[in-house]
Amino acid sequence: MIYSTEQGTSANRNLRFMLWIRCILLTAGVLALSYVTFTLIDAWLYQKRAMMTLEKQIYAEEQHRSGLPKIVAKEGDVLGRMEIPRLKLSVAILQGTTPQTLRLGAGHIDGTAFPGEIGDIGIAGHRDTFFRALKDIRRDDEIQLQSASGIALYAVDWIQITAPDDGSIVSSATQSAITLVTCYPFHYIGAAPERYVVHARRK
């Protein structure tokens, strides 16, 4: 009889423990889902605001066509918008590549040509958000780059996978081009060991 009572007490203890664990896991899941949802909504709203900022820049540029001053931008400034029609990719280009900037859009790589300038424009993005679609990009796909000075069209001419510290990813050539960089593999969990590079030449 005592043995039976002890068994019942142990079973109740195990049941309470399992319920407690279940509650913790459920709470953690809800919090994680809430964070992801908040992040996606925040990025979506920022994209809308960035488009309005770009439209104002385009309007201002149309009013002052007397020469293009050298671009000076600080981290997070809106520089333009990139679209890849076949992939249905459309994303604001912001200055810099800090985690905060790349959470909100694609980032212009410091030291490379600015959108609207002649040279190789380096643009980075997260593989699990805005640049996810790059896994399906193909040679000759069109890339449209809109800045305050107008719209430029590019065609993809090569795609390669390289090491993170490869300094030759973005060239210093004077020809107009875009180099898109994201982490690789696309489905890798954690810090990805390689970089996925897409290069496009001006049409």
Image (spheres, rainbow, N blue to C red):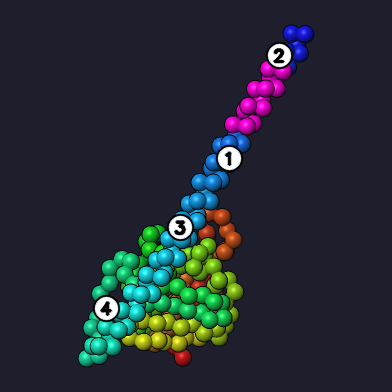
Instruction: Say which label, 1 or 4, has the lower sequence index.
Output: 1
Question: CA–CA distance between discs 1 and 4?
Answer: 50 Å
Say which label, 2 or 3, has the lower sequence index: 2
Q: Residues within 10 Å of mark 4 (few under 14, many from 20)?
A: few
Residue that label 1 marks: 25
Kindly tell me whether residue 163 is visible in this rendering.
Answer: no
In terms of secondary structure, where does tag 3 sit? helix
- Between disc 4 and disc 3, the foreground one is 3
Residue bearing the label numbered 2: 6
The picture places residue 117, in percent across and down from the top left corner, at 33, 84
Judge whether 6 appears above or below 169 on screen: above
Q: Is residue 34 magenta?
A: no
| Image quarter hosting the N terminus | top right
Residue placed at 43% from the left, 63% from the top?
43
Crowding at label 2, few (<14), some or many (≥20) Cα neighbours within 10 Å?
few
Residue extending farthest top: 2
Q: Give the magenta range.
A: 8-20
Which residue carries the number 3 mark? 39
Q: Is residue 29 visible?
A: yes
Secondary structure at badge 2 equals: helix
Point 41% across, 87% down: residue = 152
